[in-house]
């Protein structure tokens, strides 16, 4: 795709996940504590944080 712009659809994957209520509440609390704009961004931040910790 040299010279072409990739659409958002080409750069992202949609994943549907069911979570226990208590985990959802923990995500909401993390979002509020860290002033993150939306739940999707919060979940991405937590996944990245978990993966970075696992690599170290």
Image (spheres, rainbow, N blue to C red):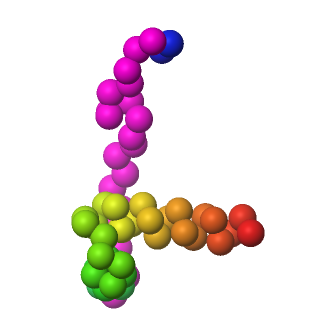
Q: Position of residue 13 (x, y in %)?
A: 39, 42
In the image, is 40 to the left or to the right of 11?
left
Q: Is residue 3 left or right of residue 32?
A: right
6 to 18, vertically: above or below: above
Q: Residue furthest right?
A: 56
Q: Let me know if residue 24 appears in the view.
A: no
Query: Is 6 colored magenta in this rendering?
Result: yes
Residue drawn 50% across and 13% down? 2
Q: Which residue is at the front of the view, 45 or 22?
A: 45
Q: Residue at x 25, y 66 (%)?
A: 37
Residue 53: x, y in percent? 65, 71
Residue visible at 32% across and 33% down in the picture: 9
Q: What is the total number of numbered labels drawn onto the structure image?
A: 0
Q: Is residue 10 left or right of residue 56?
A: left
Q: Eyeballing the image, is 40 above or below 33?
A: above
Magenta residue span: 3-23
| Residue at the left extreme of this rendering | 38
* Residue 38 image-quadrant placement: bottom left
Q: Position of residue 31 (x, y in %)?
A: 31, 77
Magenta stretch, overall SS = loop
Indicate the quadrant where residue 16 lies.
bottom left
Up the image or down, 24 lies above or below 36; here it is below
Whether residue 48 is visible to the viewer of this picture, yes or no, is yes
Q: Quadrant of residue 22?
A: bottom left
In this view, 44 is above or below 23: above
Q: In which quadrant is the C terminus drawn?
A: bottom right
Q: Position of residue 24 (x, y in %)?
A: 31, 79
Q: Is residue 11 magenta?
A: yes
Foreground pick, 16 / 41? 41
């Amino acid at each position: 795709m040299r010279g072409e712009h990739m659409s958002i659809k080409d750069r992202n994957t949609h994943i549907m996940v069911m979570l226990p209520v208590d985990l959802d509440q923990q995500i909401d609390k993390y979002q509020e504590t860290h002033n993150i704009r939306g739940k999707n961004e919060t979940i991405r931040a937590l996944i990245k944080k978990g993966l970075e910790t696992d690599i170290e």
